[in-house]
Amino acid sequence: MSSAPLLETRGLTVRFGAVVAVNKVSVRIDRGDVVGLIGTNGAGKTTFLNMVTGYLRPTGGEILLEGRSTLGRSPRELVAHGMARSFQVPQLFPAMTVREHLLFALALADGSAGALLKPLHSAQRQARADEVLGRFGLQAIGERPVNLVPQGQRKLIDIAMALSLKPRLLLLDEPTSGVSSAEKMPLMEVVFDVIRASGVTVLFVEHDMDVVRRYVTRILAFRDGSMIADGAPGDVMRDAQVASAVLRGRAPAALAKAGAA
Amino acid sequence: MSTLLTILIDGLIYGAWLFLVAAGLTLIFGVMKVLNIAHGNLYAIGAYVAATAMGYWFADRPPSFAAFAIQLGTAVVAGTALGLALDRGVLRRLRGRDEVSLALATYALLLVLDDVIQFIWGTSAYPASAPYGLLGSSEINGLRFNNYEFVLLAAAAAVGLLLWWLLQRTRTGRCLAAIIRDPEMSGAMGIDVERLYLATFMLGAVLAALGGALTAPMIQVAPGLGAEVIVVTFAVIVIGGMGSIPGAAVGALVVGLARAATIHLFPFAEVFIVYAVMALVLAVRPEGLFPQAALRKI
Amino acid sequence: MNSLRRTDASLLGLLAVLCAAAFIAPSWLMSLLAVALAKGLVALGLLLLLRAGLVPFGHALYYCLGGYVAGLGTPWLGIRDTLLLLALASLLSGAVAFAAGFLMRRYRGIFFAMLSMALSMILYGVLLKSQSLGSSDGFTVARASFFAMQTAGVGAIRSVYLLTAVVTLLAAWGVSRYLTTAMGHVGPAIRENEVRVEYLGCSPSRVIHREYTASGALAGGAGALVAILVGQVDPGMGFWMTSGEFVFIAILAGAGGIWGSLAAAFVLEGIHALAFEYAPQYWKFVLGATLLLLIVRFPSGLSSMLANRAGARS
């Protein structure tokens, strides 16, 4: 296993006029990591994600995916190099059914002219789509137009499409936002079952500390555009700066418990 | 460099003309998100009405400065009437629709108005030369310029100032700025959005008609007047950033100078130059020179 | 799949009917049908772009190009065979569309629409000014000739009519197949959520470029067929008025797939024929008013085709 990081940013910065949304963030993510990105609203987490995934152009710094710079590369190129993402607001196709989303993603994942010129609903692809629907617990709503699907399942479809691309690096933007507290954990269980089976490296933005604690091997904490902590969950959660900036209002007992986890 | 001076003056005059027509188009788009493809027809109708009115007035009278009053008057009347008819009759039923549907509607209006013009004025040309010789001519650098052309410059400057004052210094202007940002919110805050939409469209129509009325003495007022105008005007507002009035001014100037330079130096390129400039600007700044801020989508 | 077989059968059936009609229909009807079919051919190409939310306001550019190529093929290149001229016209129009596609593929919405219009105005301007091409009068085109057999009179009309029917229905079959493929679904996906398409590893621009090129080739072929049928070309073929007819067909066709496009073309020519009877001077008015009616009265059909609905509001 090579020691080169899967993803690395060096001094990554972006400015919008006078506002520095992301300020010299340097991070290393290795293969197999499951990294949680925490911070309050406006701390720059999604902006960071948008730069790493090629949606936003940084004003300074570098991004290296498997050692190669991603600056100037389009999202499409990054996907071809093994990156995939989901979105804070699930980005779906209103007129397609749930099943069609997966068929479409599987066809595009293949990407070859042969795959693209085969009918969308080919028998072979249907079988694979059924398999994915099954793993995500979406079989029951396969034929439903995605407009009529509740938020939790929309999130799952969004993530399922990203995973269909068989990425090496998966980025999830607030996978449980907008989902009721009762559904959060079951949703993440389903997602991480698939993630563990595929061995993909994950970076996800999340506000719910329970979710973060349960799945990550590492935490990055953002505040006002800068990264203020990077390390094992216990260490980061106990860090005083992080406590005041991100974990406001948490009782010390809970923190200690988090530290011990 | 007398050629340079000529290009400069020609460019300024053509730019002034472009701004006169483009200002209304970009204003309407900025506020209503409607790309008024029928804008050229409003310009043409302005020219026809002015030409007809001047034809009547000067049938037995010698040319006089009353011509300018007629031009201004007919432009205001025609523009207001047309603006009212088109907004209330058509555009109001399409509020909130996507930009392409709105543009399609104005495209349909282009077709309709073209035949309306033909119906009313037929296919013959209407001379409107009354004011053209009024101001005499000047000689600059050995070249004669009819002073009427400088009227265009003055008109463009006046329109620019008027719009600046309107948008920056009046309450109406601030309301318009709010509507540009977010029509729904503006309505919720108590701004009479419908009335301002109507007012904006009427103002845009008046500006277009004024452009036509002022240009009438310089050209042949005949069928086909509107068609060429819309594409060039679109190029100007794209270059400047759609919805931006300062952008329209800069765009008009750039296109005006480019075209003047082409006519004097590379005449064969005249057909393409406007689009070449537009393509160049878009390649570097896809949203134009002064784009409206875009919201983050994901 | 069942519906595919049904489509194939229906197309074949329609072709049979149209061919049979060739032997009993009067020549004015064959001419009308041929023009309708040719415009249907243009509409099929436009269908691809429309599904992606793109409405080119100046597509008559390629139609006009095709007509001129077919017309010039004989005097300039000595080509008399109609099939060759058709192929040449489609190829050249397709090539121009391919070249223009590099620019057009980067734009959406009104930009795309107006750039398309600008391009057609440039061509129109060039043709209008060129004395050698007959300027505003255009020039005449030689009658159809197949494998060195020159046709004349009714035979000329009948042969072009049959050719047009075959070509159009073949194209309809091709497009219908294409629409079932994964690539055929990229267009609507682009309209609904282009960002997502990019993040699935597909280049929206490349797909649009391909579809734009194909639609240019189809329009060019249609222009050639009409030129040979009518025996005449002039710059008006590229004027925005002609584009307006195509836009009308596209809007009327809505989301109706290949049948919508074919039907809409026939409706257009029907209205055109009627207007010609009663108010030939005011065709623009009739077309524009009908288009307005469609846009105002049938928003859902249109909006579902054109509106960009990227996730945020839902």
Image: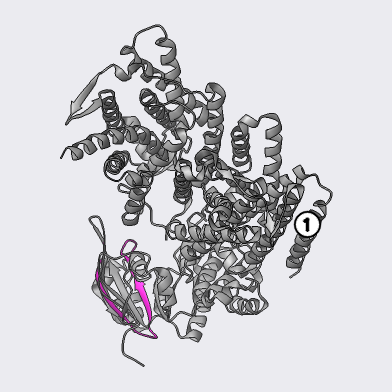
Q: Amino acid at mark 1?
A: Leu
Say if B58 sits above or below B261 in the image.
above
Q: Does dot 1 land on a helix, a strand or a loop?
A: helix
Extreme residue toward the top, this view: B60
Q: Is residue B298 above or below residue B110?
A: below
Q: In the rendered image, is residue B252 in sight?
A: yes
Whether residue A173 is visible: no
- Residue drawn at (45%, 28%), measured in percent from left and top? B44
Q: Which residues are magenta?
A: A21-44
Q: Nearer the viewer, residue C103 or A155?
A: C103
Q: Quadrant of residue B60?
A: top left
Q: Is C206 drawn above or below residue B107 in the view shown?
A: below
Q: Which residue shows up at 65% across the image and 79% down it?
A: A124
Q: Position of residue B290 (x, y in %)?
A: 30, 47
Instruction: Find the residue positioned furthest to the bottom.
Output: A1
Residue A48 place in picture, x, y as percent: 33, 68
Q: Is residue B105 left or right of residue B264?
A: right
